[in-house]
Image: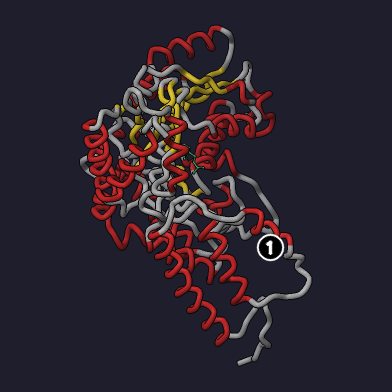
């Protein structure tokens, strides 16, 4: 065996193992402190910035000290999504198997651009994608891949829609269309669509934000009217987006109506189920997504309700040839014998991390039943929160079947922004301000898989304290 000298970047085996073990113990202790402490940051930012500025990267520093310093800064300098009282945006405390997957991927560091370089990894991902597609009721020939998140998955869908609508889009971009290409999503959709329209080259004005029905869902009649008006004006409707689980309120658009209108116009039908898609795990909740099986493409984030570590989305489509047309490229330097299974010729990324292992291990460890229990627990706890708040005179203004509540304080209480500010300052829980049908609401989502009725009780106390007008 050759002996490599120890170096800061490549420590020797013994030193490396000691550091890894110490890091494992330090991280576990930090996590215990996080869960027992405030949800919101308690960092002295001025002191932190001074320390940061002192890193001039001249003299090498001791790794052990640096790792401890880093953990301490994150322990005090983050909103803790790993805290069970983070009732927040869809950033769950990550499930353990996904963290193990990250460790494994970091050590082997496989390159998933091509099948040839990483056949085992590519096939694990394909297996998970097929299993998720089957569970969602999509056609048997559905394909797809892992993405960095929902935004990339949604962008992939738009590029596919444009490519199918006008094959010349590949060469000519938006100029390939006889009229301006436009697409439709409800005004409660995720606003990443604006950035995606910009990036795709069709421009932000191509996004038609369709009126909602007063309950936070796309108004199908308004969609039909908007599509007719655009057709009249010579625009080209390329895609209809149904959101299955809106960000603010967990509402599901009328997917079957959206699908029918898209089909009539020859447009692509995309379902953005970035968060709500995890409902496929539960036989009881899956009917909420009825109509998803009609989609030309679907976005589901593993890093949302499936609670894998951050940066793990999926895009699924039964139109494998469109995916290939949209992302194909021929190079002299990539191993090319396996083009039909090479991720880099069917997706936006080139070099890719082994993201799919996170969901593979989590699904394998817990089974669909384990995930069914996970999502049903969240929905049940949201029901507890709803009942207890209503008993105290608070109002829940959304009617979501999923685990997010839009809350209005009782008459005479402080306003929504004041209450949320006070809850965050208390550090006892994290909630946010959202807009539902044009009004400010307190948004509380059961986000952490280990949140309990006691945690909900503490949130209610914090909301009550924040609401009292006499402070
Ligand atoms: C979170 C979310 C997105 C964006 O996904 P990222 O994973 O943050 O990129 C898009 N649509 C919906 C409905 C979402 O909930």
Taking the spot 61% from the left edge, 21% from the top edge, the residue there is 205
Q: Where is mark 1, residue-wise? A: 51
In this orientation, does residue 296 appear? no
Kindly tell me whether mark 1's CB lies below 8 Å from ligand 1.
no
Q: Nearer the viewer, residue 317 or 441?
A: 441
Q: Classify 48 as above or below 231.
A: below
Residue 459 in the figure: left or right of residue 101: left
Residue 135 in the figure: left or right of residue 239: left
Q: Nearer the viewer, residue 69 or 13?
A: 69
Tell me where residue 329 appears, x and y as whole percent: 64, 46
Taking the spot 48% from the left edge, 10% from the top edge, the residue there is 228
Residue 386 in the figure: left or right of residue 120: left
Q: How many residues crowd mark 1 within 10 Å: few (<14), some (14–19), many (20+)?
A: few
Taking the spot 49% from the left edge, 42% from the top edge, the residue there is 150
Q: Quadrant of residue 385?
A: top left
Q: Secondary structure at mark 1?
A: helix
Q: Quadrant of residue 342?
A: bottom right
Tell me where residue 424 appears, x and y as whole percent: 45, 43
| Placement of the C terminus among the 4 image quadrants | top left
Residue 428 in the figure: left or right of residue 72: left
In the displayed image of the protein, which residue is found farthest to the right?
58
Taking the spot 53% from the left edge, 31% from the top edge, the residue there is 191
Tell me where residue 13 appears, x and y as whole percent: 56, 85
Q: Classify 390 as above or below 437.
A: below
Q: Nearer the viewer, residue 107 or 457?
A: 457
Tell me where residue 343 appears, x and y as whole percent: 54, 52
Numbered circles on residues, count: 1
């Amino acid at each position: 065996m050759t002996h490599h000298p120890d170096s800061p970047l490549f420590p020797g085996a013994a030193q490396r193992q000691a550091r890894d073990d110490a890091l494992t113990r330090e991280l576990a202790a930090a996590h215990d402190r996080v869960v027992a402490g405030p949800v919101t940051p308690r960092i002295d930012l001025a002191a932190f910035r001074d320390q940061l500025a002192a890193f001039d990267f001249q003299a090498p520093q001791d790794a052990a000290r640096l790792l401890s310093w880093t953990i301490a800064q994150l322990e005090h300098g983050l909103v803790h999504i790993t805290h069970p009282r983070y009732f927040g945006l869809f950033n769950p405390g990550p499930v353990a198997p996904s963290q193990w997957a990250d460790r494994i991927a970091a050590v082997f560091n496989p390159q998933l651009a091509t099948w040839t370089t990483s056949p085992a990894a590519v096939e694990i991902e394909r297996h998970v994608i097929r299993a998720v597609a089957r569970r969602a009721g999509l056609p048997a020939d559905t394909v797809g891949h892992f993405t960095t998140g929902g935004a990339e998955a949604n962008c992939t869908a738009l590029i596919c829609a444009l490519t199918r609508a006008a094959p010349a889009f590949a060469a000519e971009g938006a100029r390939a269309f006889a009229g301006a290409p436009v697409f439709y999503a409800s005004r409660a959709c995720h606003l990443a669509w604006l950035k995606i329209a910009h990036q795709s080259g069709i421009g932000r004005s191509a996004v038609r934000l369709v009126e909602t029905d007063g309950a936070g869902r796309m108004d199908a009649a308004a969609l039909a009217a908007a599509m007719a008006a655009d057709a009249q004006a010579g625009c080209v409707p390329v895609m209809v987006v149904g959101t299955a689980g809106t960000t603010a309120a967990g509402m599901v658009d009328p997917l079957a109506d959206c699908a029918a209108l898209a089909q009539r116009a020859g447009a692509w039908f995309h379902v953005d189920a970035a968060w709500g898609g995890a409902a496929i795990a539960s036989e009881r909740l899956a009917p909420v997504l009825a109509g998803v099986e009609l989609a030309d493409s679907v976005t589901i984030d593993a890093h949302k309700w499936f609670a894998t570590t951050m940066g793990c989305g999926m895009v699924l489509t039964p139109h494998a040839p469109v995916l290939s047309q949209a992302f194909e490229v021929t190079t002299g330097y990539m191993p090319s014998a396996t083009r039909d299974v090479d991720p880099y010729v069917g997706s936006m990324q080139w070099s890719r991390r082994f993201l799919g292992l996170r969901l593979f291990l989590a699904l394998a460890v817990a089974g669909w039943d384990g995930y069914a229990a996970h999502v049903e627990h969240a929905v049940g706890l949201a029901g507890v929160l709803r009942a207890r708040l209503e008993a105290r005179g608070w109002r829940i203004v959304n009617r979501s079947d999923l685990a997010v509540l839009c809350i209005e304080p009782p008459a005479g209480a402080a306003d929504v922004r004041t209450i949320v500010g006070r809850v965050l300052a208390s550090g006892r829980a994290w909630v946010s301000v959202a807009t539902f049908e044009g009004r400010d609401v307190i948004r509380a989502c059961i986000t952490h898989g280990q949140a309990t009725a006691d945690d909900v009780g503490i949130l209610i106390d914090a909301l009550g304290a924040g609401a009292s007008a006499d402070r």
